[in-house]
Amino acid sequence: MSINATVQYSILCRQYATVQDYTSHFGFGETLAGLIGIECTTIWNHTSHDDPLWSARALIDNPGEIKRVHTSFLHSGANIILTDSYQASIEGFCRHAQCTSEAAISVIKRSVSIAKEACQEFLEETQNKEGNELSRNLLVGGSVGPYGACQFDKSEYHGNYVDKMNLEELKSWHRPRIKILVEAGVDFLAVETIPALVEAEAILQVLNEFPSVICWVSFSCKDQTHLCHGEKFCDAVTTVETYKQVEAVGINCSAPEHVQGLLSSIHGKSTKPIVVYANNGQEWWKKRFDNNPDYISYVLGWLEQGAKIIGGCCGVTPADIEDIRNAIKDRLTTKFIHSDN
């Protein structure tokens, strides 16, 4: 299944969600792709803020809360939801939850079954209530976060660990979780918050072992030009686009004010749909997120720059996703009216 074909207009959350085909609904030929919103920080609010497993702890202690949050983002308009596996690893569960390796594998698989159940239950609940306008295909993306996210040392925000690890070490670390998510039946892999190009390439080389799997790759960036580790964003994008399993590329877990410059840097160079789900402007370690009144205006600007899959990462709530969806719908309606005139 193609991400681009399924998500003709998507909203993502971190519980993400795909987007419904607005182009078909409004009858004009612009291909838009997605809506995403965030779930990890929402789940994190219900766990210990100092837990090295972060939101993945809920897979053991409170799986019902994960499903509830998934469902809240679906009701807000997300069509793509991501599994709660961003900070999940076999070694992490063994070390911090006293799991056996077999139990840790089962816990990571649970992240997929919870997301799939949330989608199925949502569709059953809404299919006779919301009408054709809101009926939509949903996707479950398997969240593949960076090595640093599982170290609980904030190293995912600079990626300097790649300077001490070789490619094979990175591949060996990522392989088990990728295998678990693929075998559990995700629709695609969301390779996300990647701070360094070499780590993205390591993951994509592992994906060669699963040739039927497709993915998107989204990088975390420290300014309007560079990944958190320092590589140029435009170079990283053009490099990962050479891997045939990559169906979309972009930015997540980055400051919204950086996105315009990042998108400008790949204008005319990228051949894939663009994914953007930035933070709302606050850092997670401040342990609070303030609403950013400019986020919607940022989103509309990203759409003008060609972003196809849109959403929010840290600090973006279901209410924000609903606002984004409404703003996008208004934009498309207005564009349709103007084009009709």
Image (cartoon, rainbow, N blue to C red):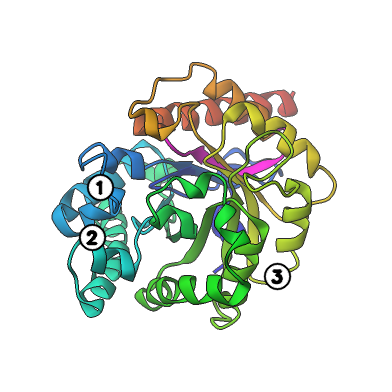
- Between 203 and 140, the residue placed more toward the observer is 203
Local secondary structure at mark 2: helix
Instruction: Decide whether residue 271 is among the magenta residues.
Output: no
Segment colored magenta: 304-314
Q: CA distance from mark 2 to mark 1?
A: 9 Å
Q: Which labelled disc corresponds to residue 290? A: none
Q: Is residue 328 left or right of residue 283?
A: right
| Residue 72 horizontal/vertical position (percent) | 29, 40
Q: Is residue 275 left or right of residue 135?
A: right
Determine the residue located farthest toward the top in the rendered image.
293
Q: Are marks 3 and 2 in contact (CB under 8 Å)?
A: no
Instruction: Decide whether residue 309 is among the magenta residues.
Output: yes
Q: Nearer the viewer, mark 1 or mark 3?
A: 1
| Residue 157 horizontal/vertical position (percent) | 52, 44
Dot 1 alpha-carbon crowd within 10 angstroms: few under 14, some 14 to 19, many 20 or more: few
Which residue occupies 29% across, 70% down?
109
| Residue 168 horizontal/vertical position (percent) | 58, 77
- Between 266 and 118, the residue placed more toward the observer is 266
The reply to whether residue 8 is in sight is yes
Q: Which labelled disc corresponds to residue 243? A: 3
Q: Are marks 2 and 1 in contact (CB under 8 Å)?
A: yes
What amino acid type should be assigned to the residue bearing mark 3?
Tyr
* Residue occupied by mark 1: 51
* Residue occupied by mark 2: 96
Determine the residue located farthest toward the right in the rendered image.
268
Dot 2 alpha-carbon crowd within 10 angstroms: few under 14, some 14 to 19, many 20 or more: few
Reply above or below: 44 against 336: below
Q: Earlier in the sequence, mark 2 or mark 1?
A: 1
What amino acid type should be assigned to the residue bearing mark 1?
Asp
What amino acid type should be assigned to the residue bearing mark 2?
His
Quadrant including the C terminus: top right
